[in-house]
Amino acid sequence: MDIQNYNPAGKYKNRLELLKLLCILTFIGSGLAAFSNLFILLSFDVVSELMDETTINIPEIAMILSGGKSFFLAGFVLYVVSLAGAIQMWNLHKIGFHLYTASQLFILILPAVMIDPKMFSVVSLFLTSAFIFGYFSQIKLMT
């Protein structure tokens, strides 16, 4: 019995290498992003104070911090949902695709909505679209 490809419903399915790769990359990316958003959320006051006191002026950091704690809380929650979706897809459950896709679309627009409409990233749109289409191509494997 091949445990790695065993489905709880009792059916064997071949998990394509692309699905494995996408899931592993999502585990890494969403996991690190969730951790960093949580870290900044928990240390927001210290980071803000440090930025106010420093003589180094980094406008990008100041702009991101202008989103406030709610920006980092929303980012943390959305990345956790994205990670949960990837875990579900790793276990071959279609609901994971829907969780992942919804969270990634919200992550894509989060900076533009909460900070500045100019913060919409075409590069992020391309990368997000590539992952969503990659996962969608594997949806036939999921129940």
Image (tube, grey):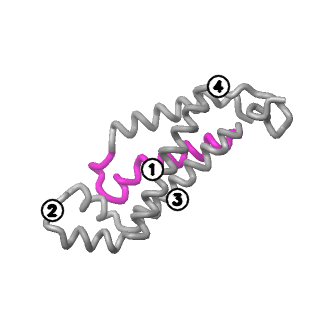
The numbered mark, 1 or 3, whose residue comes first in the sequence reads: 3
Magenta span includes 115: yes
In the displayed structure, does residue 132 sit left or right of residue 110? right
Q: Please state which of the two labelled residues, at mark 4 or mark 3, is closer to the viewer.
A: 4
Task: Identify residue for label 1.
Answer: 107
Task: Identify residue for label 4.
Answer: 16
The numbered mark, 1 or 4, whose residue comes first in the sequence reads: 4
The numbered mark, 2 or 3, whose residue comes first in the sequence reads: 2
Task: Identify residue for label 3.
Answer: 77
* x and y, in percent, of residue 79 in the image: 51, 52
Residue type marked 2: Ile
Q: Please state which of the two labelled residues, at mark 2 or mark 3, is closer to the viewer.
A: 2
Task: Identify residue for label 2.
Answer: 56
Q: Are marks 4 and 3 in contact (CB under 8 Å)?
A: no
Q: Which residues are magenta?
A: 93-120
What SS does tag 4 mark? loop
What SS does tag 3 mark? helix
Q: Mark 1 to mark 2: distance in Å?
A: 29 Å
